Image (cartoon, rainbow, N blue to C red):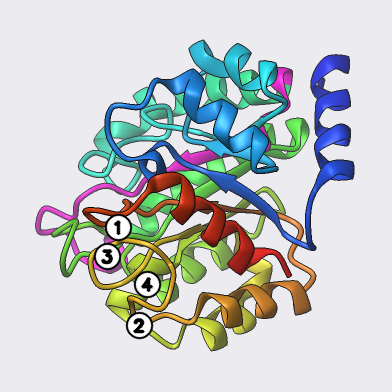
């Protein structure tokens, strides 16, 4: 069950949210060398809802600054290289995924990341079958504890060669076969811009399968402003119009010479709709 403290925290965050969308941060937006507690202080002062991909050892620091740990990181649900697409990983990852679900439920963490891993010569069809098999083995526990298991979409063109879950159609096909209200996709806008583009139409057509978003400018995964090719204000408006209730985490790296905090203020303004 959700602890009383975690439930109160989430209620406070919802009440304090700015705009229609719940915005979060990741560590990379602060650049290099900033102490974690200072990151949390900045995120709290700017009014962010939560902090993505932070492990249990640092959740007390997030709570100190009234931030929700919005996404359990790996390796509970695999890594980019070794994930649920390989059957030899299933027994090990099933055990750790159950552990992650229980940790999330006890601490007010709404999502846990799942990664498909590399293909290593495997066909997309076989990889999809393996993903479905694994997710079917853990979905009942996620449903019981009301935790979203988020299979991440990553590009295999630039950053993650050979990654299995590299197109929205692949991920949606897996979601449709698993057909659970608690098994969804982590839609990384940067990665899917590289692989297929047509971002807003794809989001609109598949929103029922999307639980969480990551942002990042393309090319270069820098700020989400006019220095790159995506119109993030339009994307934010589309998510608002769709009444998206999950979280959007900013996951870019500040360009050389940019002030990380000024960039973060700008990103938050773009998504405050």
Q: Tell me the quarter of the picture where residue 159 sits.
A: bottom left
The residue under the point 42% across, 34% down is 77
Residue 192 - label: 4
Q: Are marks 3 and 1 in contact (CB under 8 Å)?
A: no
- Label 3 vs 4, first from the N-terminus: 3
Q: Is residue 62 above or below residue 110?
A: above
**C-alpha gap between disc 2 and disc 3:** 17 Å
As helix, strand or loop, the secondary structure at mark 3 comes to loop
Where residue 140 sits in the image (x, y, percent)? 68, 37
- What residue does disc 3 label? 155
> Is there CB contact under 8 Å for labels 3 and 4?
yes
Task: Please tell me how crowded label 1 is: few (under 14), some (14-19), or many (20+) other residues with Cα within 10 Å.
Answer: many
Is 164 covered by the magenta stretch?
no
Residue identified by numbered label 2: 229
The magenta-colored residue range is 106-126
**Residue at which label 1 appears:** 127
Which label lies toward us, 2 or 1?
2
Dot 3, crowdedness within 10 Å: few (<14), some or many (≥20)? many
Query: Mark 1 falls on what kind of element?
Result: helix
Q: Position of residue 124 (x, y in %)?
A: 26, 67
The mark lying in front, picked from 4 and 2, is 2
Label 2 Cα crowd, 10 Å radius (few <14 / some 14-19 / many 20+):
few
Q: Which mark is residue 260?
A: none
Quadrant the C terminus occupies: bottom right
Closest to the observer, 106 or 217:
217
Image position of 201 with respect to 271: above or below: below
Whole-angstrom CA distance, mark 3 to mark 4, is: 6 Å
Nearer the observer, disc 4 or disc 1? Answer: 4
């Amino acid at each position: 069950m959700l602890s009383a403290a975690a439930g109160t925290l989430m209620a406070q965050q919802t009440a304090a949210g700015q705009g229609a969308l719940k915005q979060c941060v990741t560590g990379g937006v602060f650049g290099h060398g900033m102490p974690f507690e200072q990151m949390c202080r900045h995120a709290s002062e700017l009014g962010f809802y939560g902090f993505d991909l932070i492990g249990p050892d640092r959740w007390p620091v997030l709570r100190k600054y009234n931030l929700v740990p919005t996404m359990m990181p790996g390796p509970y649900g695999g890594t980019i290289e070794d994930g649920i697409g390989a059957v030899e990983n299933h027994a090990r990852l099933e055990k750790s995924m159950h552990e992650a679900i229980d940790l999330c439920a006890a601490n007010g963490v709404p999502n846990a990341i799942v990664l498909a891993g590399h293909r290593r010569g495997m066909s997309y069809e076989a990889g999809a079958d393996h993903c479905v098999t694994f997710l079917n083995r853990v979905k009942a526990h996620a449903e019981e504890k009301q935790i979203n298991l988020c299979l991440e979409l990553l590009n295999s063109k630039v950053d993650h060669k050979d990654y299995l879950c590299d197109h929205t159609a692949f991920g949606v096909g897996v979601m449709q076969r698993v057909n659970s209200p608690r098994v969804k996709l982590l839609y990384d806008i940067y990665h899917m811009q590289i692989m297929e583009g047509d971002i807003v139409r794809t989001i609109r057509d598949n929103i029922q399968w999307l639980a969480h978003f990551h942002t990042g400018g393309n090319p270069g995964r820098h700020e989400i402003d006019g220095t790159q090719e995506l119109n993030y204000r339009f994307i934010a408006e589309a998510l608002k119009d769709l009444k998206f209730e999950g979280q959007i985490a900013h996951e870019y790296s500040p360009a050389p010479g940019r002030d990380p905090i000024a960039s973060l203020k700008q990103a938050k303004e773009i998504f405050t709709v």
